[in-house]
Amino acid sequence: MRHTDRRFIQANREALIALILSLAYFIWWYATAYGLGDRAVEEYTYILGFPAWFFYSCVVGFLLFSLLAALMVKLLFKDISLDKSEENLRGDA
């Protein structure tokens, strides 16, 4: 019986987590940019000189998702060996 290399399982898991975070960032950006920016320019509110839609979508979103990405790497990603060995080839944990 052929076992899947545990490194591939971990890499696929990490790729899926990164994809989910990227999709969440896009949804955040789209919702705040187009949700708050659909008024006439005269009706915009400003935060630190930026229109609110820009501030929340580009400034807050960037800071928030950069923090989430750092936490994701620290807490969910694992350091794995790239050396080919019998231990890495076993499919069991």
Image (cartoon, rainbow, N blue to C red):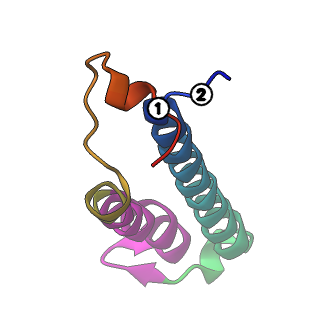
In the displayed structure, would residue 45 be above or below residue 12?
below
Q: Mark 2 packing: few (<14 Cα in 10 Å), some, or many (20+)?
A: few
Left or right of 28 on screen, residue 5: left
> Which residue position is annotated with label 2?
3
Expressed as whole percent of the image width and height from the top left, the position of residue 2 reads 64, 21
The amino acid at mark 1 is Arg
| Residue closest to the eye, 45 or 83 | 83
Magenta part, dominant SS? helix
Mark seen at residue 90:
1
Q: Mark 1 packing: few (<14 Cα in 10 Å), some, or many (20+)?
A: some
Expressed as whole percent of the image width and height from the top left, the position of residue 49 reads 33, 73
In the displayed structure, would residue 85 be above or below residue 24?
above
Tell me where the magenta segment starts and ends, as one range: 46-69
Disc 2 from disc 1: Cα separation = 6 Å
The amino acid at mark 2 is His
In the displayed structure, would residue 13 be above or below residue 20?
above
Quadrant where the N terminus is found in the figure: top right
Left or right of 73 on screen, residue 44: right
Label 1's element?
loop
Left or right of 14 on screen, residue 37: right
| Residue closest to the eye, 6 or 73 | 6
Residue at point 44%, 25% (across, down): 89
- The answer to if 89 sits in the magenta stretch is no
Label 2's element?
loop
In the displayed structure, would residue 11 be above or below residue 43?
above
| Residue closest to the eye, 37 or 75 | 75
Residue at point 53%, 36% (across, down): 91
Expressed as whole percent of the image width and height from the top left, the position of residue 90 reads 47, 32
